[in-house]
Amino acid sequence: MDVNSHEIDKLKVSDTKCSYCGNPFAKKLWCKECDPWCMIEGWTSGNSDIDKFMKGTIYEARNKECRPRFLEWVPFYRFTGIKEISEGGFSKVYSATWIDGESNFYKQDDGSWKKFDPKPMKVALKRLNGSQDMSDNYFSE
C-alpha cells in the first residue's frame, strides 16, 4: 500500500491542537491528555529495557530549549510499502514509508511548543535476529 494524497491530507496538523487527540495544546510539548498517555504510557515494545530507554529520551526532550529529539514507538501499521532489501548473518533490512514521519517540534517565543506538519518519509527498518530476547546489556554494546 502506498501513501496517497488522501492519507497525507488526514495527517495535516493544526497549530493549536494535538495531533493525537485534537485537544488544544497546553504550554508543553504535548497536550495534557496525550502527555503521558500516547507518548509515554500508551504503548509498549514488549521489552521493559527498551521501553525504559525510549521513555527516557521523551522525558529528556521536554527539557530542551529548541527542536527536541526523542525516540518514538511507531506501530507497524504506520509503515507502508515494506520491502526486504538486504539480509545478513545477524539481521534483515527493509525499506518502507513511515506515513507520519518523525515528530518535530520547536519552541515559540511565548514558551509554548509548535509541531511541524508531519510528512511521510522513507525509512530503513532493521530486524535483528534474536532481538526478542534483548537484555539491558545489549544497550551497553
Image: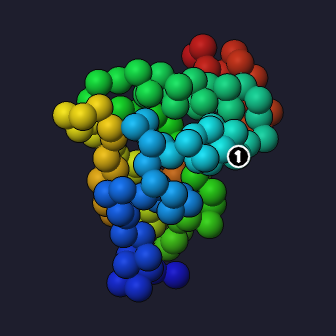
83 and 20: which is toward the camera: 20
Callout 1: helix, strand or loop?
loop
Residue receiving disc 1: 43
Give coordinates of residue 18: x percent, y percent. Answer: 47, 55
Q: Is residue 116 above or below residue 140?
A: below
Give coordinates of residue 71: x percent, y percent. Answer: 50, 37
Asked if one can make out residue 101 in the rendered structure from this viewpoint, the answer is no
Rendered residue at 33%/40% (across/down): 113
Q: Is residue 106 left or right of residue 96?
A: left
**Crowding near the residue tagged with mark 1, few <14, some 14–19, many ≥20 C-alpha atoms within 10 Å:** some
125 and 45: which is toward the camera: 45
| Location of residue 3 (image quadrant) | bottom left
Q: Is residue 81 left or right of residue 42?
A: left
Q: Is residue 46 above or below residue 134?
A: below
Rendered residue at 35%/23% (across/down): 64
Q: Quadrant of the C terminus?
A: top right
89 and 127: which is toward the camera: 127
Give coordinates of residue 69: x percent, y percent. Answer: 38, 33
Q: Is residue 141 above or below residue 35?
A: above
Give coordinates of residue 50: x percent, y percent. Answer: 67, 31
Q: Is residue 135 left or right of residue 107?
A: right
* Residue sticking out furthest to the left: 109
| Location of residue 65 (image quadrant) | top left
- Indicate the amino acid at tag 1: Trp
